[in-house]
Structure formats: structure tokens, C-alpha cells
Image (cartoon, rainbow, N blue to C red):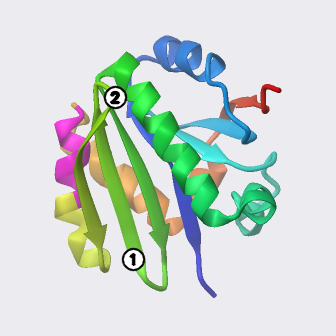
Amino acid sequence: MSYYYQGVIVADTQVAVRVAFSALDSFLLLRLTRLCDEVFGIHPGAPQTGPETFGMPEEGRYGRSHVSDELCRIAAILSEKSGFALWDSWDSCVGGWSRLYRHGSLIREITLEDDHDDDEEAAMLMSMGIAARAAYEVISAKRDGLHHTNLGLAEHGPLR
């Protein structure tokens, strides 16, 4: 069975992330979670009932590429406020993709072929000011699906 994750990672204080999150204007239902320390994830999808539903309602409704485009737009917006944001996508069958935004602009993009690319992904996270230990915790949680167990901090629905 394939496991798929897609979201935006941002490092900042909880207050700053909550303020930025609440100001987002998106057609997606978004969920804010704490990944570790002062590292937060913003993910698409309905309230969680388990890993099998993570992100799927929004992707089923809008298509994976539209969700990816919207999350990249959100990463660019959040990077204007916090300095950096990382759009991140991981499929356990094919690998992943990451795009690093700084002050609203895409500055780096990588393709992750397998688990051996952890150092390259960790380097991107550390360039955001995330400590090495926390960077590897985020990577591990993402790949293992453990972010499902993290306490959701907020949900934000589409503004129409």
C-alpha cells in the first residue's frame, strides 16, 4: 500500500504561525499541526480519523496537482511572513519532492528518490533555521505517517 503526504512546513513561533494560518485565503480545507518544537505543518484534508484519510478528501475533490499548486502558493505566502517555508510531498512508492521558498520566491527544488536522500532534505530544513535533530524528526514523522498523531492546532476552511 502506498502512503502519500503533502503539506507545507514552516518554522516560527506558534503565535506567528497561528496568525499567518488564520489569514490564509484558500479553496482548501487546511489543518495546522505541530510537527516538533517550533516546526509546524499545514496539510489539506478533513478532520483526521486516521492515516488512510489524510489529505484524501481534498485531493479527491480538486485533484492532486491542483492541491499541490495551492500548497505551493501557500508556502510562498507563508515564507513572506516567516522568512522560509517548504512545500513537501512524499509518496512511499516513488519518493518525494520539496520546494523551498524564501520571502515569497522559490529558491530551491529537489526530488527525493528514496530514504537515502534524508541528508539533502534535512539540509533544506536546516536552512530554514530548524535544528538538525528536529529536521530529522520531521522527515521521520512524515515518512512514517506519525504526524497523524500530533495534536491538531487549528482547522481553516475555504473562504468564499
Q: Distance between the residues labelled 2 and 1?
A: 26 Å
According to the picture, the residue beneath numbered tag 2 turns out to be: 104
- Residue 116 sits in quarter: bottom left
Which quadrant holds the C terminus?
top right
Does any portion of residue 123 appear in the rendered image? Answer: yes
Please tell me whether mark 2 sits on a helix, a strand or a loop: loop
Dominant secondary structure (helix, strand or loop) of the stretch shown in magenta:
helix
Q: Nearer the viewer, mark 2 or mark 1?
A: 2
Q: In this view, does 78 lie to the left or right of 148?
A: left
Which residue lies at the image location 62% right of the left edge and 24% below the top edge? 24
Question: What's the residue type where badge 1 is placed?
Answer: Gly
Q: Residues within 10 Å of mark 1 (few under 14, many from 20)?
A: some
According to the picture, the residue beneath numbered tag 1 turns out to be: 95
Relative height, residue 47 to residue 65 (above, below): above
Q: Is residue 56 left or right of residue 1?
A: right
Q: Where is residue 143 in the image (x, y as percent from the top left)?
A: 46, 67
Q: Is residue 2 left or right of residue 127?
A: right
Question: What's the residue type where badge 2 is placed?
Answer: Gly
Please tell me whether mark 1 sits on a helix, a strand or a loop: strand
Q: Position of residue 16 (x, y in %)?
A: 47, 13
Q: Between residues 29 and 136, which one lies in front from this camera angle?
A: 29
- Residue 119 sits in quarter: bottom left
Q: Position of residue 9 (x, y in %)?
A: 43, 41
Does any portion of residue 35 appear in the rendered image? Answer: no
What's the magenta region? 121-128
Relative height, residue 116 to residue 39 (above, below): below
Q: Between residues 56 and 160, which one lies in front from this camera angle?
A: 160
Q: Between residues 7 and 49, which one lies in front from this camera angle?
A: 7
Relative height, residue 159 to residue 99 (above, below): above
Which residue lies at the image location 69% right of the left edge and 57% below the top edge? 55
